[in-house]
Structure formats: C-alpha cells, structure tokens
Amino acid sequence: MSKKETPLFPLRKGLHTRQAHVDLPEGTFEEEHARQGFYGRTSHLYRLHPVTDWTRIEGPLRPHSYDLNQLASREDQAIRASQFGSREAAFAPICVLHNADVALHWVAPAAMDFFYRNADGDDVYYIHAGAGKLETTYGAIAYATGDYLVIPRGTTYRFLPDSSAAQRYLLIESFSEVTIPDRNQLGPNAIFDPAMVDTPELEAYDATPREWAVHIKRENEITKVFYPFNPLDVVGWKGDLTVWRINVKDIRPVISARYHLPPSAHTTFLAQNFVICSFLPRPFEEEEGAVRVPFFHSNIDYDEVLFYSAGHFFSRDGIGAGMVTWHPQGIHHGPHPKAIPLSRTKERTDEVAVMVDTFRPLKATPAAGLVENLNYWASWK
Ligand SMILES: [Fe+2]
C-alpha cells in the first residue's frame, strides 16, 4: 500500500460533517469513496438513502454469500472441479474464491499418513473449528480454534487433527510471501506482541521404517516423492524462516472511543495485492455521534471477502458462523439495515471474523456456487 499525500484542507460542498464518521448531518447516510482500500485519496458523500437500498440488480456485479458449513461433506462434481492440487481423502482443500494472488479454500482434514508441500504459495490457515498437531520439517506445533498457522512455501507438513472434534479450517493460500504490517506509530508491541508468536519444536517423530510419501503441489498438480525414512528427520535448524502460530485471542485490536477506525486498522497479514484482517471482540465507539458500524463504501480498488467465525456479526444480519460474504469492487456495501439501530443498543461486539481484501478481482469456483445464498443481494434492501 502506498502512502498518500493528504491535503490538509480538502474540498467541502453542501451538507457534510467535517470529521468523517462523526456527527453525520441529520437524516443522512455517509458513503466513503476511496482509493487503495482505506489508504488512498478519500471523499465522503452524504446521501438521503443508504446506497445499498437497491430494488433490483441486472448484470453480473452483486454481493455474494456462501455457507461453507455445507461444503465439507459433499461429493458433487462441482467440488472435484474446485479442488486444486491435493484430493486425498485426508486432505482435500476445496477452493471457493481465487485470483492470481490468493486462493481461499475450505479444509476439513483427517489424520494424514503422508506429508504435503505447497510449492505454489505460503499457506495461512485460520482454525475455525477443531484442534490437533501440525508436524513440519521445523518441528511440531499444537493448534486450536482461533489459531492462525503460517506455513512458508516449500515447508513439508501434515495435519494430525484430534479425532474427537470436527475440523474446519479456512486456508488462505498466498502466491507471494506473507508478512506482517509495520506498526508505525503504534510501536512494535501493538496489535500482537511478536513475543506472543509460537514456533514449532523439534520432538520425537514416528521413525518406524516404512515408505513415506511427500505430496508436492506445483502449479496445482501433485507430484508424489517417496522416501524409505520419515522426512521429519531434521535434527536441528537455524534461521529466520519457519512455521509460526498466533491465536486471535492474542491479537489486541486497536480502537478509538471517538472514531470508527477503518478495516485496515485490523490488518494482521500482508502479501502482494491482498491483506488479511481480523475483526475481534472490542468495545464500540462510545462518543455520542461517532458511527459504530462500517460506513457505506464501494471499496473501488478491492474485492472484500469476510469469513464469519464466531460471535454476533453486528454489521451483517442473517450471517452465521462458517459463512463467507464476497463484495466485489464496484458495488457498494456497508452496514445491514438492522445493524445501525442495533449498534446503538450495544456496548461492544463479540465477533470473530477474518477479512481478505484483494486488489485484483476474485472468481468464484463451482463449489462456491453449490452453497451460495442467491438472495443475499436482496438482504440489503
Ligand atoms: Fe468493505
């Protein structure tokens, strides 16, 4: 994201508030028109109607929503057509949305008796439900609900999930290296302290003599390489590239009591042409007059994907855990009609949601089509 030169005195016409998102003129709805996500030049328009109050939409551009809960147990042709790479029973990510920079998959793994290596991208897992142990060439690490696991491209790994719980992971596959944003004036320990990050430990592994397979994904094709020994035979390593884990409970969102911060304030990871943000439990803005829900915007330079994991999703009525919304660039979104009055009656939000904002337009797969709520666009009326 490039920084903008902010003119100190922007143009102002007609009825407006001087401080964005605070004390909107009576009876108006604020719309943000901005470039480069929330980083670029911006204007606020004050309208008499919510800009999402459409009566109908003709043409391909519309908001979408998908219920991923319905995906894991299905065996449709469309599911097979949406699996890029591994289709093993124990590890068969189902892609729902993708572009040249990022692919979002739904994964319900079982204990893998083989190893996997992604030679196409970094794998960021968000553990929506379940727990277990991740074995990697850097060692093993336990994981649980709410964890992000960041696995650099080229790492050999396998999941050994607990058999007791349902396993549901959101996989954000990044075709460029995943990093974390600069904290700038917040200081190095803000949002999450780097000391809260855990990394794998080398530990005893299954050294029984047998044949072990490593399934390597390259350009979405699988090559299986076989060894007469367990490929976790690493006895030591040094360096600054490894697998790492952070739980959303250890991410402390930045808030302002007097100003609704844009989604970019909640950025957890950065990669080329997309960002991953975490929306986590936090108090609402407390000043009378400060808006408490996301303002209407068209995010003209980004597609916005939100995965709802837990809690009550204050800005989107009718959305439950395990669902995804996708708002393509060019058409507006904002708070759902019921969200504005609801937010005034509440002190805080308990939502846990993961957002992926992509610079380049996304495409939905046939699997996504299977679990789409086709009336979602109408829920905004
Ligand atoms: Fe947005």
Image (cartoon, helix red, strand yellow):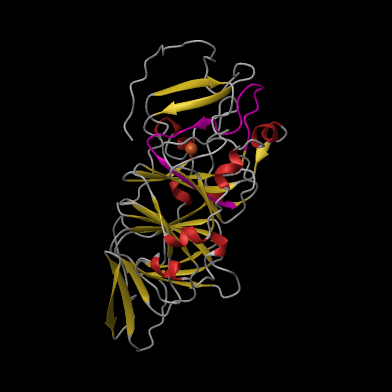
Taking the spot 34% from the left edge, 82% from the top edge, the residue there is: 212
Viewer can see residue 234: no
On-image quarter of the C terminus: top right
* Residue 315 image offset from top left, x and y in percent: 60, 39
Viewer can see residue 240: yes
Taking the spot 31% from the left edge, 45% from the top edge, the residue there is: 272
Instruction: Kindly indicate the quadrant of the structure image that contains residue 86.
Output: bottom left
* Residue 262 image offset from top left, x and y in percent: 49, 32
Task: Magenta stretch: give its range.
Answer: 283-309
Location of residue 123 with respect to 133 vertically, above or below: above
Q: Does 306 lie within the magenta span?
A: yes
Between 372 and 245, the one nearer to me in the picture? 372
Q: Does 199 lie within the magenta span?
A: no
Between 183 and 22, the one nearer to me in the picture? 22
* Residue 347 image offset from top left, x and y in percent: 69, 35
Taking the spot 39% from the left edge, 67% from the top edge, the residue there is: 81
Q: Is the magenta stretch mostly helix, strand or loop?
A: loop
Taking the spot 51% from the left edge, 57% from the top edge, the residue there is: 147
Between 331 and 45, the one nearer to me in the picture? 331
Q: Quick one: which residue is furthest to the bottom in this view? A: 209
Location of residue 253 with respect to 174 vertically, above or below: above
Location of residue 197 with respect to 73 vertically, above or below: above
